[in-house]
Image (spheres, rainbow, N blue to C red):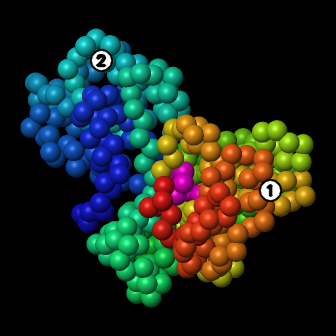
């Protein structure tokens, strides 16, 4: 198999699974090669490890820890082991209860698990294993990972030494990423036809393995129409009542469908920042798709000209989501007069708010709304992402930083 280096996740697994000995879970969307990451560690530790994929034993239940450990011994043909690798744990009812008992009973095991497409298992792990586990959310590739796979060069190196390469030699890679984004199978595919075929298979698998178990046949038809409606509205404030009227479905159904999209890790929402002032918009969220390739497939268009500004904003927001620390919160900011800031990054440790504007074209003009925002909140810097211009300058006491959007990863 072709290898795509995912150092960020490998470092996290090394830290939580091996050094801190926490029960470690690789969770989130389907087809992001969580199993591949687990395999790399299993191959290192195989002589003292067991590997179980519950995809081959769907629905198995365990009543006791001893029953579970005996199952591992029989399935792996090993009487003793130190490392336990469990793949597709969302298929095992009550698995978090068993893992909790193993941890609390003082067994000397290192446990690494993966699960896909099920918010239920995520909730169970959150509730029952607090203090014993670490959850690593595995997303499609960042542009930094994509670029390194394609060129064997880091973005940091290009930023410092060969900035013009991005705009000249490698700009076609930016366009490819914005169109098809970061599912590993899509990235390694050679032809456009294969990329679209893999995106279709990812979409079909999601519908078959997650959605069909939740919705009736009639609801699935409405859900498909609803999904296209949400895709058209990506990066915009979503008004549930408008969608309800357009699609002739109830408001409760709209809310249910949006929650399903969130629970299956296809979209995430960002809410408005409204701390103090009457002229700030306080309601309504913006929705963002986990992957531009999947978004474009749902929209049935891989032509960037028509919706380039939405595609770029969706990309930049998601790069922030992928690398977000626990002490960071993401918002947008909008005034009643309709002027808005695309993204506000709030740092709880420093109590700083950083306004971020995202432009698909080349520009270095800072939005005037930055100044009015800075009069209300504690701001040390402004960031403008654009197509090609980069520089930094002082505006009073504030650093104004202009960055090409494809370098966003190295500034997070």
Residue 192, position in %: x, y? 46, 80
Residue stretch rendered in magenta on the structure: 317-322
Return the residue found at the far top. 105
Residue 11, visible in the rendered structure: yes
* Residue to which mark 1 is pinned: 372
Circle 2 crowding by C-alpha within 10 Å: few under 14, some 14–19, many from 20 = many
Q: Nearer the viewer, residue 59 or 198?
A: 198
**Residue 151 at x, y percent in the picture:** 32, 76
**Residue at position x 31%, y 72% from top?**
153
Residue 150 as seen in the image, left or right of residue 283: left
Examine the structure image and report whether residue 321 is included in the region drawn in magenta. Answer: yes
Q: Is residue 249 located in the magenta-colored stretch of the structure? A: no
Q: Residue at x 39, y 32 (%)?
A: 134
Q: Residue furthest bottom?
A: 168
Res. 102 mark = 2
In this orientation, which residue lies closer to the viewer: 191 or 209?
A: 191
């Amino acid at each position: 198999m072709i290898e795509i280096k995912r150092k960020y996740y490998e470092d996290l697994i090394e830290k939580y699974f091996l050094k801190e000995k926490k029960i470690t879970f690789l969770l989130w969307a389907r087809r992001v090669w969580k199993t591949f990451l687990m395999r790399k560690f299993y191959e290192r530790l195989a002589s003292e490890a067991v590997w179980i994929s519950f995809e081959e034993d769907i629905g198995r239940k365990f009543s006791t820890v001893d029953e579970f450990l005996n199952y591992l011994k029989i399935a792996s043909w090993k009487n003793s082991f130190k490392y336990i690798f469990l793949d597709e744990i969302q298929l095992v009812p009550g698995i978090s209860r068993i893992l909790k008992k193993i941890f609390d009973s003082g067994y000397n095991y290192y446990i690494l698990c993966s699960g896909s497409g099920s918010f239920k298992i995520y909730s169970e792990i959150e509730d029952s294993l607090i203090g014993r586990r670490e959850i690593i959310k595995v997303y499609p590739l960042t542009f930094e990972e994509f670029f390194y796979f394609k060129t064997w060069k880091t973005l940091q190196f290009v930023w410092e030494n060969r900035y013009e390469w991005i705009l000249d030699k490698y700009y076609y890679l930016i366009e490819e990423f914005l169109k098809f984004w970061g599912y590993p199978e899509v990235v390694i595919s050679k032809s456009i036809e294969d990329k679209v075929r893999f995106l279709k298979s990812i979409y079909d698998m999601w519908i078959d393995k997650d959605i069909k178990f939740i919705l009736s046949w009639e609801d699935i038809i409405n859900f498909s129409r609803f999904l296209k409606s949400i895709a058209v509205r990506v990066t915009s404030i979503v008004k549930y009542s408008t969608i309800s009227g357009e699609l002739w479905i109830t408001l409760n159904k709209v809310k249910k469908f949006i929650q399903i999209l969130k629970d299956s890790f296809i979209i995430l929402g960002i809410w408005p920042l409204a701390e103090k002032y009457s002229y700030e918009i306080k309601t309504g969220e913006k929705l963002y798709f986990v992957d531009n390739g999947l978004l474009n497939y749902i929209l049935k268009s891989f032509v960037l000209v028509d919706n380039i500004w939405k595609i770029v904003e969706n990309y930049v927001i998601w790069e922030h989501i992928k690398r977000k620390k626990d002490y960071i919160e993401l918002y947008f900011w909008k005034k009643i007069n309709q002027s808005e800031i695309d993204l506000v990054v709030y740092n709880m440790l420093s109590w700083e708010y950083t306004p971020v504007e995202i432009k698909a074209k080349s520009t270095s003009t800072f939005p005037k709304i930055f100044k009015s925002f800075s009069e209300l909140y504690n701001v040390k810097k402004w960031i403008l992402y654009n197509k090609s211009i980069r520089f930094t300058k002082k505006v009073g006491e504030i650093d104004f930083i202009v960055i090409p959007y494809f370098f966003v990863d190295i500034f997070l």
